[in-house]
Image (tube, grey):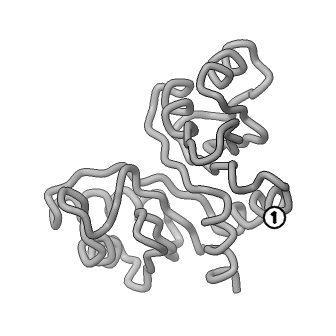
Amino acid sequence: MRCVAFMRNVNQGQRGHPATADILAGFADAGCPDAQTFQSNGTIVFESDQPARAVESAEEAIAARSGQTRDILWIPLADLITIVHEHAGASDAHRVEFTLHSGGTIDGRSPEVATLTAQHRCSIVDAGPGWALVRNDVEREGHATPVLERLTGGRASSRGLPTLIRLIARFAY
């Protein structure tokens, strides 16, 4: 199965972050020798029959190689394609972040969620198990990761919808 992984808090090539070579070698060590990075933000496209196990192994291998521990969340590419295609045509797509998180499905209509997102100048526009689409009220602001981490009590990692549109154009074949 082809999947997309988001490493949390990564800026490849910067001091204190895992290098691209370490990320790719870590995925190779995890049984995904054809993994490819996309941009420099810790987004990886990989194939595996057991993606959860592969990601867990890659986390360990990358930490051992780079000395940098990072959480990695993943989604099947086919699921990501469906979600992105549903929202790519929105006029404000540049304000939308897709977030993978370690919780269940977030109900954007619940009072707790509505209050927290309003405080952070954003709103949840769609959600499913382990993911959410968040629209930011203010241009060039990104609130999805901290909001989803607060709501779920676990780690989250976000990518802008325009980034994912480009990823799908490149890898969806």
Is residue 123 depicted above or below 65 in this figure?
A: above
Total count of labels = 1
Q: Amino acid at mark 1?
A: His
Q: Position of residue 105 (x, y in %)?
A: 68, 34
Q: Residue at x 32, y 67 (%)?
A: 12
Tell me the residue that label 1 is attached to.
Answer: 85
Q: Residue at x 80, y 23 (%)?
A: 109
Residue 144: name its quadrant: top right
Q: Residue at x 62, y 81 (%)?
A: 171
Q: Nearer the viewer, residue 141 or 130?
A: 141
Q: Residue at x 48, y 74 (%)?
A: 38
Q: Position of residue 113 (x, y in %)?
A: 68, 21
Q: Position of residue 73 (x, y in %)?
A: 48, 52
Q: Nearer the viewer, residue 88 or 153?
A: 88
Residue lying furthest front = 139
Is residue 154 depicted above or below 173 in this figure?
A: above
Q: Nearer the viewer, residue 24 or 145?
A: 145
Residue 14: name its quadrant: bottom left
- Secondary element under disc 1, as helix, strand or loop, is helix
Within 10 Å of disc 1 (Cα), the crowding (few <14, some 14-19, many 20+) is: few
| Quarter in which the C terminus is drawn | bottom right
Q: Position of residue 94 (x, y in %)?
A: 69, 56
Is residue 15 toward the left or the right of residue 162 in the image? Answer: left
| Quarter in which the N terminus is drawn | bottom right
Is residue 72 toward the left or the right of residue 145 in the image? Answer: left
